[in-house]
Amino acid sequence: MTQEGEEQRFRLPILQGVLPVDRGGLTRDVLAGLTLAALAIPGTMGYTKIIGTPVITGLYTILIPMALFAIFGSSRHLSVGADSATAAVVAAGLAGMAARGSDEWLALCSLLALMAGVLMFAARVLRLGFLADFLSRTVLVGFLTGVGVQVALLEVSGMLGLQRTSNDPLLEIVRDLRLIGESNPYAVCVSLAVLAVILGCRRISDRVPGGLIAVIAAIGISWALRLDAHLETLGAVPSGLPTLGLPQVEWNWALLQKLLPIAFACFVVILAQSAATSRAYAAKYSDRFDENVDMVGLGMANLGAGLSGTFIVNGSPTNTAMVDGGGGRSQVAQLTTCVLVLLVLLFLTGPLAHLPTAVLSSIVFLVAVRMIDIRGMHRIYVEARAEFAVALLTAVTVVVVGVEQGILLAMVLSLLDHVRRGYRGHNSIIAADKRHKGWLTVPLGEPRQIAPGLLVYWFTNSLYYANAGQFAEEVLRLARGKGDAPLRCLCVQAASIGDVDFSAAAMLRDTCKLLAEQGITLVFAHASPAVRAQFDRYGLTEVLGTEAFYGSLRAVLDAWEHLRDATEASPPDAAGSTPPA
């Protein structure tokens, strides 16, 4: 096939993560899918304990949602399925709205998946993929660390064989410590054995499916020793395919209003986490991916989850890393996993009845502990103390207040951090470098003229209401400063100005008049056509004059030197000559 033909196939609205098929790597992708199934099946069953749904729904998150993303998404690497972060957001948000684990609870979880899917489609129509860029890595590290701490603390009761009584991690861990003497010894032994198996396998290789080995061994030992008489097990697990249909809830606007904040919080987590994961692996292998197309794939995956009776799905960094470690380089690996889960649902759910719930608690506990990014937090602390405070505040909010409030705080802090960094530019002066016969930048405190009577001010941001005052203050301070010669012309290097709003335009009119009263002309260099059009619309061109705009600093200098030469040849009259404007 020609390169042009491959390009056309890649641009199909479906199967962008599969086509073109690398026949040489097909076996490798299939083997990676087997690895993912071995590691993800016990993990997804464990996530059901976080969100409070039947264990079979964990397998449902792999069957249809993962396949739908493989068909409609663009990333060749992103693995979509159950995720601890979104599971924790849903569990915290639904607390008090229904009995945890009931049919109504499951229906609400499925409805949230549908709502998240709709939000994804709306974001695609509005091209909001860029929103993923506004959750900084700092707050994501803090958020995921907080989720990890919260989930780990909540799973301690299951590992000890105690009944969980609340979703507050701090209250729950205090209660567990108070009742530790009443722990179920069988559950404790099972939990310790699972931890030993998984951690031991991990020391050998990340490709060894320690979770699957622990689950199979626990099922066999539980059946042989009849452990269901001594500790809680899953009990009967239904086999077969999920029933497709809308969630059985009483649909009304009041209910949707209650669920919308939870769905939106999940939407933000999905968008940020999935985009970051897709982007990282696309860069690693120089693959293409489109955030907006991925939003369609994620929307379809969540619609599939809602219609198949399971909960919200997300792009999973853990599962994506599993596929990558197994050698997978396309969505063929994920489709292979879907086929294996289909076989499990049809033929292998019976043995799951003997699985102790302490096994799933232990698996989730380890997943949560791995989310606690101590290394990342330490690196932030060492390299950026102020950002560490933001990350720590986000993590503490998740643990103490709640996951939903934590993600909202993360969004607000990310936006505030963006505004803090972006609205006040680090402006400077462009001066003559006599030593190298060129130009250099110097601080505003050293207002060196680039030529006698000419000063160049470099403003490094767009001009809008938040920094208009800074522009005026700095320009007028420069006008009052002392130089080698009286200042007659102040040139703004406008290459970095991408936009001018109404407030900034009003400021420019006032500043121009104040400078004119001091005999100083304001001119602009490197103003883009878009900015020139804004100047025209605001009437600034009329105030400044059409000759106040230059295509380069060299043009400004040439005009200034020409004017100075003309002035020296013919001395100005009493009115004085005018600078290049």
Image (tube, rainbow, N blue to C red):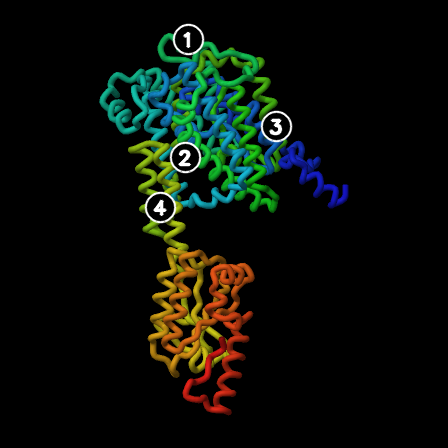
Q: Nearer the viewer, mark 4 or mark 1?
A: 4
Between the C-alphas of marks 2 and 1, the distance is 32 Å
Specify few, some or many for label 3: CA neighbours under 10 Å numbering under 14, 14-19, or 20 or more. Answer: many
Residue 199 shows in this picture: no
At which x and y percent is residue 397? 31, 36
On the image, numbered disc 2 is attached to which residue? Answer: 370
In the picture, measured across the screen, residue 345 lies left or right of residue 185, that is right
In the structure shown, which secondary structural element does the residue marked by tag 4 occupy? helix
Question: In this figure, what is the number of numbered marks?
Answer: 4
Question: Which of the two marks, 2 or 3, is nearer to us in this view?
Answer: 3
Q: Which residue is mark 3?
A: 335
The residue tagged 1 is 226
Type of amino acid under label 1: Arg
* Amino acid, disc 3: Leu
Measure how far apart labels 4 and 3 are at the Cα level.
38 Å
Q: Residue at x 35, y 17 (%)?
A: 187
Q: Are marks 2 and 3 in contact (CB under 8 Å)?
A: no
For marks 2 and 3 on the same chain, the one whose residue lies earlier in the sequence: 3
Secondary structure at numbered mark 1: loop
Residue 505 in the image: x percent, y percent?
A: 43, 61
Q: Which mark is residue 366?
A: none
